[in-house]
Image (cartoon, rainbow, N blue to C red):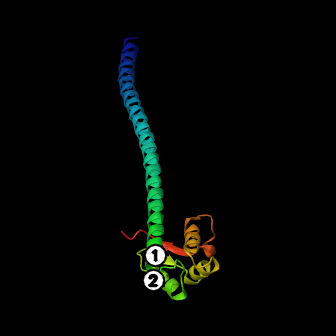
Amino acid sequence: MERELGQYKEQNERLHKTVGELEGSVKNLQELEQTLKEIKMMESSTLDELEVQLQEQKEIEDQLEDNLVAEICQNVISICLAVDKDGDMNLSDDEIALLIAKIQSIGGVAVDEEKFKAKIIENGRSMTAVMEVLRNLLDDQLDQDQNIFTELQDSS
């Protein structure tokens, strides 16, 4: 009986030791779980911040695009006034060709020369005709084959 009692004590000690190890493992797992929760919260927070930054970046890009288009419109009107040598507010074929060449020389701007010239002529060769060309630039609903302006890039 004492022998059995000794065996039970040994088993009891081993069980206490195992319970102690398991308690340590449980504590480690709980700490790991808490750490993972914190990481997940940080990732979620970081993703939220990233989404906000991406939205802000898109808004900035939209503003830059609007500014670029406004600058191009202003340049086209200024060039148009400068190439109208006789000041009659009507563009001759030579003045249209010069207008196209000067617009093409603006960094980041390219135009379809045939469409540009046709639009100016079809609308009476006047400043109103130039405004029609600029409406084409402002219309972002046009198909690619309808665009007079074929390339717009910020040259800075």
Q: Residue furthest top?
A: 1
Label 1 sits on a secondary structure element that is helix
- Count of marks placed on residues: 2
- Residue 132 position (above or below residue 100): above
Q: Amino acid at mark 1?
A: Leu
The answer to whether residue 35 is above or below residue 101 is above
Task: Please provide percent x and percent y for residue 108.
Answer: 43, 74
Residue hosting label 1:
81
Please state if 107 lies on the left or on the right of 142 as rendered: left
> Dot 2: within a 10 Å radius of its alpha carbon, few (fewer than 14), some, or many (20 or more) residues?
few
Identified at 56% across, 70% down, the residue is 131
The amino acid marked with disc number 2 is: Lys
Q: Which x, y percent locates residue 132?
A: 59, 71
Kindly identify which residue carries mark 2: 85
Which image quadrant for residue 155?
bottom left
Label 2: which secondary element: loop
Is residue 16 or residue 119 the one in the foreground?
A: 119
